[in-house]
Amino acid sequence: MRNVKSGNFSATTEFLLLGLSEDPQLQPLLFCLFLSMYLVSVFGNLLVILAIVYDSHLHTPMYFFLSNLSFVDICLTSTTIPKMLVNIETQSKSISYTGCLTQICFVLTFAGLENGILVMMAFDRFVAICHPLRYKAIMNPKLCRLLVLLSFLISVLDALLHTLMALRLSFCTDLEIPHFFCELAHVLKLACSDILINNILVYLVTSLLGVVPLSGIIISYTQIVSSVLKIPSAGGKYKAFSICGSHLIVVSLFYGTGFGVYLSSAATHSSRKSAIVSVMYTVVTPMMNPFIYSLRNKDMMGALRKLISRISASH
C-alpha cells in the first residue's frame, strides 16, 4: 500500500480491492465465473442492439429505449468487471486513487442512466396501453431522444457531485475496500475526515433519483392494470400484460437488488455480504436483461434469428 503518511492521514495514491474472497483457491473459479458472465452480458446486449438497428420493424420507442438500456448495461459491466479480472490474473489488489474515483463516477453515471431508462420504458408502456390513439403523437422520436439526453445529464451531474465531494476527503492508512470495485459507500467508510455532508447527499439523492422514479413506475403500472382490466377479451388482457411482463421483471431485479445493497449495508456490519449483493445489480441484472427481453418477445426473437442468419451468410 503506497501512500505518504502525515500524522494519522495519508496522501492517498491507491486503494486495495479485496474482492469477493481472499481465498487463493477460489480465485481461478471467480475469474472463470466473472469472465463468463461478462462475455455473456456484452455479447448478449450487443446482439440486442444490432438486432434492433438492422430490423426496421423494431424502430419504435420501446425498442429505442431497449437498445439504450443494452448499451448502458455493456458500459456498467465494463466499468467494474475488467479491473476485477486483471487484479485476479496479476494477483494484485491495487487500484489507483484516480482510478477508484473514476470508477465511482462511471458506476453512478451508468446506474443512474439505467434507472432513468427503466422509467422511460414504463412511461412508454403507459402511453401505449392507456392512450393508444395518441401514442405516435406523444412518443415521437424527438421526445424519446430528449428523455434519454435528460436522463444522461442528470446521471452525470449526480455522479460528478458525489465524486467531487469525495475529492475533499482525507483517508487514513487503512485503505482496504472489501469489494470487487470502488463503491461510494465503501470508500466513504475509509475516510478519516467528516463525511456528514457526503452521507446527507447520498441519502438525499437516493431518495430523489431512486424513490421518485420508482413511484412513477408504480403509478404508471397502476394506471396500466386499471386500463387492462377494462379490456373485454381474455386474449387482449394477456397480450397487454405480456408486453409489460419483461419490463416488470427487469425493474424488480434492478430496484430489488439496488435497494438490497443499501439495506444490507445498513443492517449488517459485514461489508463482504454487501459486496455479494452488489454483484446482482452490477453483473447479474445486465447479463439477464437480453434473455428476459428476447425469450419473452416474438419480435425480438425473429430479429435475432435474422441477424444471426445474416452474420452466418456473410462468413
Image (spheres, rainbow, N blue to C red):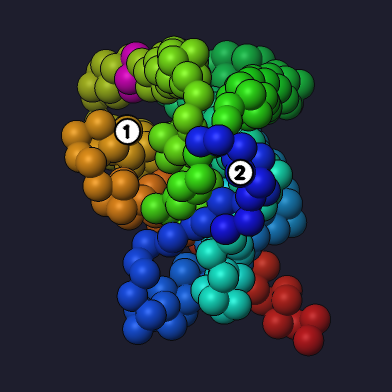
In front of the other: 99 or 134: 99
Residue at 78% in and 86% down: 315
What x and y, as percent, mark residue 180? 47, 57
What x and y, as percent, mark residue 20? 37, 62
Disc 1 on helix, strand or loop? helix
Q: Which residues are magenta?
A: 217-221
Residue 224 position by quadrant:
top left
Residue situated furthest left in the rendering = 267
Q: Is residue 145 visible?
A: yes
In front of the other: 205 or 1: 1
Indicate whether 41 appears above or below 259.
Answer: below
- What residue would you read off at disc 1? 262
What x and y, as percent, mark residue 157? 67, 21
Disc 2 on helix, strand or loop? strand
What x and y, as percent, mark residue 153? 70, 22
Q: Amino acid at mark 1?
A: Tyr
The tag earlier along the polypeptide, 1 or 2, is: 2
Residue situated furthest front in the rendering = 7
Residue 167 position by quadrant:
top right
